[in-house]
Image (cartoon, grey):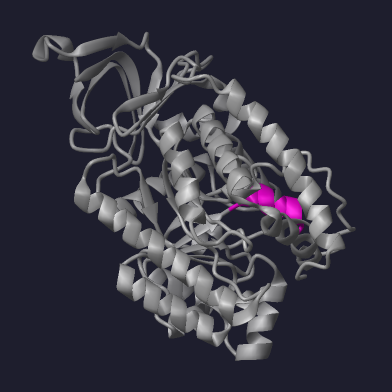
């Protein structure tokens, strides 16, 4: 047992601040929260936290770990006047150039950087068309080596190789879900990584693809993770080719339920939003990515029953993402205040509960010991009524001191328990080679 002594316990939902308490952790769970726990558990190891803030773990609810080696990219990128050309000229070239080594290093570095930013879990959405089979387990290796909790899936699509690619994507999702089920049944390792059934976006999934995805969702009991209405093109394509709104189309195949994650959703109709709400599904808002891609603003955030925050591949700094989400909302004339965005941040824990079958997001006995621990030097009083204001106007990832995942301190006093320098050195080499392959594939006439 480990006791984190003398913390300021900060709860997001419902909001609560409790100074000078102890948190006892046994195995992967919180055993107790209270005063003088060392006296109650005299055999426990004790770490004095000197009043630092201990919060339920922070979750990035939509990310792309395959993009980890894209920072500062120096491949030749054609002009991108719209969203579709951004996909074709940058991201769909990068994902085709990924191999096992570059994906492993990309995922591992992203896992490390997520932890440094205070994340205890990341929900990933993956693509590597020339390395499909085994790609999700490669990402899982990075999660486990870093100690980060995660969910991942393969984004099924027909955009490169038609029906064969659709089948390969679904097969990888199925194989990975079965691998996770087998690992849970054996019980000889921590249950840190879960599976979803992934799909790129409705405009790159045929009717046959929808049927395959629906079968995969039913047979595995997992939820669908998909981009929807990130750009108006997705909506127009759905109306033109299928004569349906996007969520209506997905729902007609049985793909909308309480485990569904829909990323972006900027241009969804009110009827689509009503379907998501009726089925208790989640929308994940990614404000920095939306701004970067110039796809517009989601001015209906308050209409969703379930809303969480993600980054769509722009790192995993959720303190930063919350700030952008709030300030962009204010700039657009939105009515929501910081406490709403604090709740959106916390909602990532509700998604984990649905996938892992455990309790997340509270500093209470019986909940998973996933904790984000930050410096406690607030220049103004921190009370339940103003936690959101501290997050929006002050506290950032630079305050992250330690991170606990599944009862283990995977990052303590701003240090990992292993040397990360060789990992970053290898990642830099892999990134340069990846950028070269992107240009080589173009010259060789790779699939558009």
Whether residue 289 appears in magenta in the rendering, the answer is yes
Question: Which stretch appears magenta?
Answer: 286-294
Residue under the point 29% across and 39% down:
190
Whether residue 78 sits left or right of residue 245 in the image: it is right
Q: Is residue 276 above or below residue 438?
A: below
* Residue 339 location (% of width, % of height): 47, 41
Dominant SS in magenta: helix
Q: Does residue 311 appear anywhere in the picture?
A: no
Q: What count of labels does the image hold?
A: 0
Whether residue 344 sits left or right of residue 11 in the image: it is right
Whether residue 361 appears in magenta in the rendering, the answer is no
Q: State the residue in front, 383 or 349.
A: 349
Quadrant for the N terminus, please: top left
Quadrant for the C terminus, please: bottom right
* Residue 242 location (% of width, % of height): 60, 90
Whether residue 374 sits left or right of residue 310 in the image: it is left
Q: Is residue 157 above or below residue 283?
A: below
Q: Residue furthest front?
A: 444
* Residue 25 location (% of width, % of height): 22, 25
Q: State the residue in front, 51 or 193.
A: 193
Q: State the residue in front, 221 or 247.
A: 221
Q: Does residue 420 appear anywhere in the picture?
A: yes
Quarter holding residue 7: top left
* Residue 168 location (% of width, % of height): 52, 71
Residue under the point 17% across and 14% down:
44
Q: Is residue 388 above or below residue 88?
A: above
Quarter holding residue 360: top left
Residue under the point 30% across and 51% down:
356
């Amino acid at each position: 047992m480990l006791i984190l002594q003398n913390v300021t316990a900060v709860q997001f939902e419902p909001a609560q601040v409790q100074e000078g308490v102890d948190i006892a952790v046994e195995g992967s769970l919180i055993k107790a929260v209270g005063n003088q726990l060392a006296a109650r558990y005299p055999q426990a190891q004790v770490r004095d936290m000197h009043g630092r803030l201990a919060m339920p773990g922070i979750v990035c609810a939509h990310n792309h770990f395959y993009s980890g080696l894209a920072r500062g990219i120096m491949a030749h990128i054609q002009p991108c006047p719209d969203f579709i050309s951004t996909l074709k000229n940058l991201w769909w070239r990068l994902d085709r150039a990924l191999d096992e080594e570059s994906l492993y290093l990309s995922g591992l570095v992203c896992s490390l950087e997520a932890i440094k930013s205070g994340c205890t879990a990341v929900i990933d959405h993956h693509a590597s068309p020339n390395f499909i089979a085994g790609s999700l387990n490669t990402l899982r290796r990075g999660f486990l080596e870093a100690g980060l909790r995660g969910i991942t899936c393969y984004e099924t699509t027909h955009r490169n190789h038609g029906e064969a690619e659709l089948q390969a994507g679904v097969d990888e999702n199925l194989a990975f879900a079965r691998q996770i089920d087998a690992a849970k049944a054996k019980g000889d390792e921590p249950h840190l990584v879960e599976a979803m059934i992934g799909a790129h976006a409705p405009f790159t999934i045929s009717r046959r693809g929808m049927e395959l995805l629906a079968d995969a969702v039913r047979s595995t009991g997992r939820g669908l993770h998909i981009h929807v209405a990130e750009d108006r093109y997705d909506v127009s394509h759905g109306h033109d080719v299928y004569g349906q709104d996007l969520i209506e189309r997905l729902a007609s195949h049985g793909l909308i339920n309480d485990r569904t994650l829909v990323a972006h959703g900027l241009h969804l109709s009110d009827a689509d939003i009503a379907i998501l709400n009726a089925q208790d599904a989640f929308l994940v808002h990614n404000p920095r990515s939306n701004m970067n891609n110039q796809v517009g603003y989601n001015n209906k955030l308050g209409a969703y029953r379930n809303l969480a925050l993600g980054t769509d591949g722009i790192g995993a700094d959720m303190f930063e993402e919350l700030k952008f989400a709030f300030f962009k909302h204010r700039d657009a004339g939105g009515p929501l205040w910081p406490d709403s965005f604090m709740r959106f941040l916390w909602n990532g824990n509700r998604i984990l509960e649905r996938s892992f079958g455990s309790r997340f997001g509270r500093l209470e006995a019986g909940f998973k010991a996933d904790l984000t621990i930050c410096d406690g030097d607030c220049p103004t009083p921190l009370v339940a009524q103003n936690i959101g204001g501290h997050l929006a106007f002050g506290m950032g990832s630079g305050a992250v001191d330690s991170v606990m995942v599944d009862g283990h301190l995977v990052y303590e006093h701003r240090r990992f328990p292993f040397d990360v320098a060789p990992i970053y050195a290898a990642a830099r080499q892999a990134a340069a080679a990846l950028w070269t392959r992107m240009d080589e594939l173009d010259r060789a006439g790779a699939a558009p």
